[in-house]
């Protein structure tokens, strides 16, 4: 049963990530309010669901992203120009993690650099 739920979660999340990527590509990485909401919702869903279906580390990967996009949607921080690029990069990493055949290829240092960017946005606000 859990494997069926896990498979559905992976398929649905990959589809949602593809849609967000396509939106970012169509707007040259510029984030509008709808995209901010979509990225926040995606990060929130992954953070809560991934550990429950046995996909570990994704919740850690999206924790800072969820915080940043929550602050953006509330208007508490401004959107830096490079946020779209970093978001696209992180989406690629998340997709790799979700696709079991590519898990081995995920560069941990690359993940850490991208996550530090999102953490720095929250740190600047504090």
Image (tube, grey):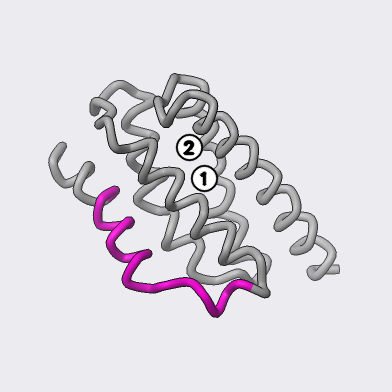
**Magenta-colored stretch includes residue 117:** yes
The residue lying toward the viewer, choosing from 104 and 44, is 104
Judged left or right of residue 43, residue 30 is left
| Residues rendered magenta in the picture | 102-118
**Residue 70 falls in image quadrant:** top left
| Rendered location of residue 56, percent (x, y) | 54, 71
Give above or below for 123 relative to 5: above
Give the label on residue 44, or none.
Answer: 1
Q: Callout 2: 10 Å neighbours few (<14), some, many (20+)?
A: many
Judged left or right of residue 3, residue 49 is left
Q: Hey, which residue is sitting farthest bottom in the picture?
A: 104
| Rendered location of residue 100, percent (x, y) | 66, 73
* Residue at the image position 37 percent from the left and 41 percent from the top: 85
Task: Say what secondary structure mark 1 lies in.
Answer: helix
* Residue at the image position 32 percent from the left and 32 percent from the top: 71
Query: Where's the N terminus, which quadrant?
Result: bottom right
The answer to whether the residue labelled 2 contacts the one labelled 1, judged by CB atoms less than 8 Å apart, is yes
Give above or below for 49 relative to 84: below
The residue lying toward the viewer, choosing from 51 and 101, is 101
Judging by the rendered image, the residue that carries numbered circle 2 is 40
């Amino acid at each position: 049963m859990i494997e069926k739920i896990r498979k559905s979660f992976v398929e649905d999340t990959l589809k949602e990530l593809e849609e967000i990527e396509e939106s970012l590509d169509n707007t040259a990485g510029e984030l509008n309010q709808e995209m901010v909401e979509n990225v926040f919702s995606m990060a929130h869903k992954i953070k809560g669901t991934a550990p429950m279906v046995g996909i570990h580390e994704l919740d850690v990967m999206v924790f800072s992203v969820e915080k940043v996009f929550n602050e953006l949607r509330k208007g508490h921080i401004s959107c830096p120009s490079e946020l779209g690029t970093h978001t696209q990069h992180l989406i690629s990493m998340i997709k790799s993690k979700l696709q079991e055949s590519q898990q081995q290829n995920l560069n941990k240092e690359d993940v850490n650099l991208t996550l530090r960017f999102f953490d720095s946005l929250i740190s600047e606000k504090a």
